[in-house]
C-alpha cells in the first residue's frame, strides 16, 4: 500500500506552505514520514521569507490532519527529513514497501506528489516516465549518495513525494527538478541505511 501525505506548515504570518511526503514505517506508537528537509527547514535553503516559527501538520489522503510530534533531519546536510505522527490516529497503516536494489536505466517509474497549485484540494498529481540516469553525488563532508534522474517530471510542491517503480515499490524521494522535463530523486537505499 502506497500512501502519500501533504505536509502543511502554518507559519506565524498565517501563511500556509506545503510540500509532499511518504508514510514510510510504523515504529511503536509512531509513524515515520519521509520528506525533503527543504520542505520543513527554513534555514536549509536560507529562503525563510521572515518565517519566525513553524507548526507542522500532515494531511493524509482521507483529509484528516495530524500534528507532527517530532522532526529529524538527515546527517551530512542531505535534503531528507523524517517526521513523526501518532500511530493511533492511523491504525490501518503498517509500512510502505521499498525497493532494495536500484532500478535500471529505461525502467518505468511514476512520481507522485501534491503540487502547490492544489493547495486546497486533496487530489495528488502523478507523472509517468522512465529512469534516464544515475549519479553518485558527494556532499561537502565527503558523504556520497545515489541520485536517480527521470523524466517523470514533478511540479513545485511535490518535493518530498515518492518515486515508485511499476510494482508500486518506493525507489526514491523526489527532491529537485532540472529544467522543464527532468526530476531528481534521492535513492531510497541511500536514505534508509
Image (spheres, grey):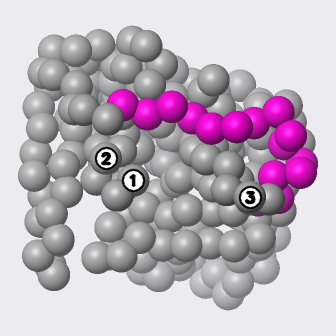
Is 143 magenta? The answer is no
Q: Give SS at disc 3.
A: loop
Q: Is residue 134 left or right of residue 32?
A: left
Q: Secondary structure at mark 2?
A: helix
Counting from the top left corner in percent of width and height, residue 188 is at 35, 44
Residue name at image x 76 percent, y 65 percent: 68
Direction from residue 113 to residue 16 in the image, left or right: right
Residue that mark 2 sits on: 189
Q: Specify start and end residues of the magenta stretch as a single range.
A: 85-99
Pointer 2: residues within 10 angstroms few (<14), some, or many (20+)? some
Residue that numbered label 1 is attached to = 192
Crowd tier of the residue under label 1, counting other residues whose Cα lies within 10 Å: few below 14, some 14–19, many 20 or above: few
**In this rendering, is residue 128 above or below 55?**
above
Sequence-wise, the earlier of marks 2 and 3 is: 3
Is residue 169 or residue 132 the one in the foreground? 169
Q: Is residue 9 above or below residue 189?
A: below
Q: Give the x, y percent position of residue 161.
A: 51, 40
Q: Are marks 2 and 1 in contact (CB under 8 Å)?
A: yes
Tag in front: 3 or 1:
3
Q: Which residue is mark 3?
A: 28
Q: Split into 4 quadrants, where in the image is the C terminus?
A: bottom left
Return the x and y of residue 115 as percentages of the image width and height: 57, 37
In the image, residue 182 above or below residue 109? below
Q: Residue at x 41, y 44 (%)?
A: 173
Amino acid at each position: 500500500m502506497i500512501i502519500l501525505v501533504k505536509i502543511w506548515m502554518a507559519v506565524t504570518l498565517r501563511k500556509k506552505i506545503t510540500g509532499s511526503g511518504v508514510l514510510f514505517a510504523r515504529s511503536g506508537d509512531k509513524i515515520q514520514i519521509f520528506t525533503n528537509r527543504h520542505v520543513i527547514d527554513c534555514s536549509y535553503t536560507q529562503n525563510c521569507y521572515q518565517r519566525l516559527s513553524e507548526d507542522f501538520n500532515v494531511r493524509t489522503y482521507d483529509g484528516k490532519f495530524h500534528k507532527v510530534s517530532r522532526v529529524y533531519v538527515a546527517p551530512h546536510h542531505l535534503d531528507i527529513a523524517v517526521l513523526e505522527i501518532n500511530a493511533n490516529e492511523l491504525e490501518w497503516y503498517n509500512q510502505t514497501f521499498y525497493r532494495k536494489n536500484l532500478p535500471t536505466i529505461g525502467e518505468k517509474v511514476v512520481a507522485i506528489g501534491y503540487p502547490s497549485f492544489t493547495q486546497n484540494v486533496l487530489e495528488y498529481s502523478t507523472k509517468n516516465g522512465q529512469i534516464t540516469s544515475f549519479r553518485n553525488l558527494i556532499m561537502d563532508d565527503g558523504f556520497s549518495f545515489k541520485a536517480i534522474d527521470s523524466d517523470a517530471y514533478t511540479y513545485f510542491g511535490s518535493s518530498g513525494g515518492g518515486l515508485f517503480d511499476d510494482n508500486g515499490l518506493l525507489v526514491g524521494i523526489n527532491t529537485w527538478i532540472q529544467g522543464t522535463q527532468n526530476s531528481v530523486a534521492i535513492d531510497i537505499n541511500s536514505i534508509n541505511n
